[in-house]
Amino acid sequence: MSALLTLWERDVVRFFRDKPRVIGGLVPPIVFWLLIGSGLGTAVRVPGAPEGMTFLQYFYAGTLVLIVLFTSIFATISIIEDRREGFLQSVLVAPVSRLAIVLGKVLGSATVGLAQGVAFLLLAGAAGLHPGLHGYLLAFLVLALASVGLTALGFCIAWVLDSTQGFHSVMNLFLIPMWMLSGALFPAQTAPRALRALIAVNPVSYAVTGLQRALLPEAAGAGAPEIRTCLLVLAAFAAAMVAAGAAVASRRDSR
């Protein structure tokens, strides 16, 4: 537990001391939300949306997930940096279980992503969303589970790579399709059948739908998963990714 908390604290402190990184992780998605939401808001109407709901409001949940997605996963680049600096080797030879190392790194990076997601969540009122305390709590829970799962996914990939350039290339192969096929830009119900099947097995889509259910239930659309289903899928995804991270870190030839 001591090692877990130390690794968690180290990543959190390093993040908040790096002001450009804090700004760079939060401001671009907000600008993206305003530009895309405002630009498409006058030309696109969400199918099945009730009167009065703008595309800017529909796109809010997708932007929240985008913030957590990029911040959580790219925070795991520190694994490659720690290996280069020799810190990771020092941790691996310490009398600490690999699971504690995985949890410390994953929870540290997930906290970073969750903090930025919560900062944007506080702007829900400015977007015309007023879910109440219960809605905010559900949204926080969805963000927390999504942060852990996505960070653990980034951990599994970063652990076996040696260069940040390779990490960026591989993650872009996962990130963009996962986000675009999540219902962030268009409802899953309006997609072709083949895309609907991909959306159904995409864990990020349950994060988007869960946030829509929590913040603006009308945005989820008919036939979308209920909030309980979204939470169960995200919890299973987080547990599976943490277990995969522990398995990868426990390999004898771990570098």
Image (cartoon, helix red, strand yellow):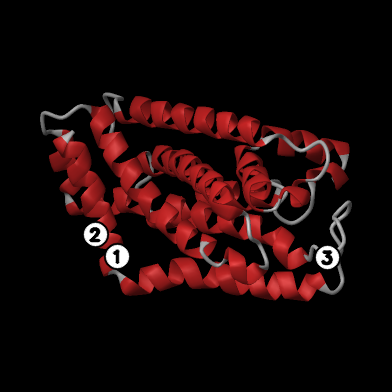
Q: Amino acid at mark 1?
A: Phe
The answer to which of marks 1 and 3 sits earlier in the sequence is: 1
Query: Residue tagged by mark 1?
Result: 16
Quadrant in which the C terminus is drawn: top left
Regarding mark 2 in the picture, which secondary structure is present there? helix
Q: Would you say the residues marked 1 and 3 are in contact, meaning their CB atoms lie under 8 Å apart?
A: no
Q: Which residue is mark 3?
A: 52
The x, y position of residue 26, in whole percent, is 48, 67
- At 55% across and 44% down in the image, what residue appears? 138
Secondary structure type for disc 1: helix
Q: Quadrant of residue 23?
A: bottom left
Tags 1 and 2 in contact by the CB under 8 Å rule?
yes
At 40% from the left and 26% from the top, the residue drawn is 243
**Residue type pointed to by label 3:** Gly
Badge 3 or badge 2: first in the primary sequence: 2
Whole-percent x, y for residue 230 in the image: 62, 35
Label 1: few (<14), some (14–19) or many (≥20) C-alpha neighbours in 10 Å: few
Q: Residues within 10 Å of mark 2 (few under 14, many from 20)?
A: few
Q: Nearer the viewer, mark 3 or mark 2?
A: 3
Task: Say which element carries label 3.
Answer: loop
Q: Residue at x 64, y 39 (%)?
A: 206
Which residue in the protein does label 2 denote? 13
- Residue 35 visible to the viewer: yes
Q: Residue at x 39, y 41 (%)?
A: 155
> Is residue 68 shown left or right of residue 75?
right
Mark pair 1, 2: CA separation: 5 Å
- Which amino acid type is marked by label 2? Val
